[in-house]
Amino acid sequence: MTRPFVFPGLTTRVVFGHGTLAQVPDEVARMGRGRALVLSTPQQADQAQALADQLGARAAGIFSDAAMHTPVDVTERAVAAFQGMAADCVVALGGGSTTGLGKAIATRTGADQLVVPTTYAGSEMTDILGETADGEKVTRRDLSIRPEVVVYDVDLTLGLPVGLTMTSALNAIAHAMEGLYAPDRNPVTEALSRDALTAFASALPVLRDTPRDPQARAQALYAAWGCSTALGYVQMALHHKLAHVLGGSFGLPHAETHAILLPHTTAYNEAAVADLLAPIRDAFGHASAGAGLWHFAHDIGAPLRLEELGLTESDLDRATEIAVKNPYANPREITRAGIRQLLQDAWEGREPA
């Protein structure tokens, strides 16, 4: 019997394909906007300038200081630039750092957003914003945070380094994983999650060996869209709480942290909802979902140990205390002992039991 559900409907316009970056000026015009502030990280400043040049008279300028975990002080500078240039929308080009900055500007100013993702991190379709200040990352949701348009250009991912390909994809898979057991899940988000898991399981081994394979790149970007959309319409749980703690309070890199935590957070909740995580077992071909993800991450060369990211064993107690304070809703009870053991296993890189 199909259980009751509520699905609010998709609101973000999506443009997907090869060469779709060329459509950004038309999409800005379609939003009724004429002065776009183009955002990027320092590493992608040249790409941001090229996009601003492409926008021509519709570009107000660029801001290329987007940073990991969306620091509030960077956002304040960006908002000042936005207002100083009399911009009326933002175009965010890049991964999760740039997308987060665009969201932070939009929710403070009411600006429309257009996002051009260049990784698989998968935050572009969500109404979620995590911001860091004073050593703590605070996450919130609001309709003003969700972008109006997302332009997916497969060609922009062809040169994505293999390491970032794998870690950002595992980051996206974490969205699908939590979408499978969220209390407000629905048939649409469940179907998107299952489809995305299968697509990533097929595409990532190909990209490990042939990074510029256009078909595998298209399949992976499609999977990232599915994962991002699923998370955009359900509650987050333990996995995202731990990732936010380790990123906001310990400065760990976002995608790598998600990648390492994923098998362990999956295994933790698998003890309570193994039936709901069956699509992961099916996609990655293992007797358990957590172990299947761990072996898959190992096979594609993703990092497995939090120790590799600079987290010390003495940090684990503090991380546990922060994580069990104000926990997100989760299908399995979050206990201090359970989280401490999960973090120890992730720090050592053990295969989940």
Image (cartoon, rainbow, N blue to C red):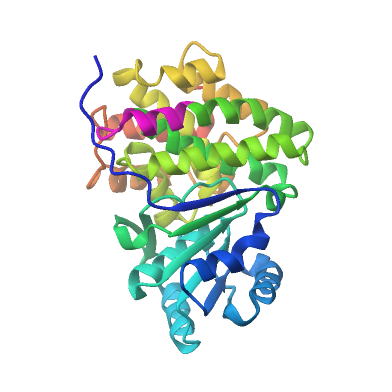
Disc count in the image? 0
Q: Residue at x 26, y 35 (%)?
A: 184
Q: Which residues are the magenta region?
A: 181-194
**Viewer-proximal residue among 155 and 160:** 155
Q: Residue at x 50, y 28 (%)?
A: 195
**Viewer-proximal residue among 10 and 243:** 10
Quadrant occupied by the C terminus: top left
Q: Quadrant of residue 187?
A: top left
Quadrant occupied by the N terminus: top left
Tell me residue 144's x, y (percent): 33, 63
Q: Is residue 345 visible?
A: no
Q: Residue at x 68, y 74 (%)?
A: 49
Tell me residue 259's x, y (percent): 53, 38
Tell me residue 27's x, y (percent): 54, 64
* Magenta stretch, main secondary structure class: helix
In this picture, residue 293 sits left or right of residue 118? left
